[in-house]
Image: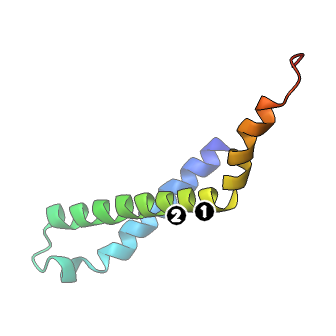
Amino acid sequence: MLLLYYAGGLFRLYGTFECFSNLLPRITPNYNYTVFLSFVFFVVLGCIHVFDWVAIQFISITAGRIFICFPLLCAFRPLSW
């Protein structure tokens, strides 16, 4: 399963690179790969950070009630646990 996810991530990155390679002449008309790869790196990492923030907000909104009530449940548990 781990190898399957690794291969899926590799193909996803390859697809992202291929999609952005169509934009290469617009980003850098003289085909400077230093600027292009920096742009792709920025977009990929930017998307990762945005989706992390969205996931954190979703978890805090939907499951926040469970985390708030959890200390109360632990305070009233029997001593034999």
Observer-nearest of 54 and 25: 54
Tell me: 81 left or right of 44. right
Residue at (52% x, 55% y) in the render: 9
Contact between marks 2 and 1 (CB within 8 A): the answer is yes
Q: Could you tell me the amino acid type at mark 2?
A: Val
Residue 69 versus residue 10 in the image, above or below: above
Observer-nearest of 35 and 81: 81
Residue at the extreme bottom = 26
Q: If the image is split into quadrants, where does the N terminus sit?
A: top right
Residue at (39% x, 75% y) in the render: 19
Q: Measured from the top left, where is residue 77 in percent x and y?
A: 85, 28
- Mark seen at residue 32: none
Tell me: 54 left or right of 1. left
Residue at (14% x, 73% y) in the render: 31
Disc 2, SS: helix
User: Which residue is the site of mark 2?
Assistant: 54
- The way the protein has been coloured in the rendering is rainbow
User: Which residue is the site of mark 1?
Assistant: 58
Q: Could you tell me the amino acid type at mark 1?
A: Phe
Indicate the quadrant where residue 14 lies. Answer: bottom left
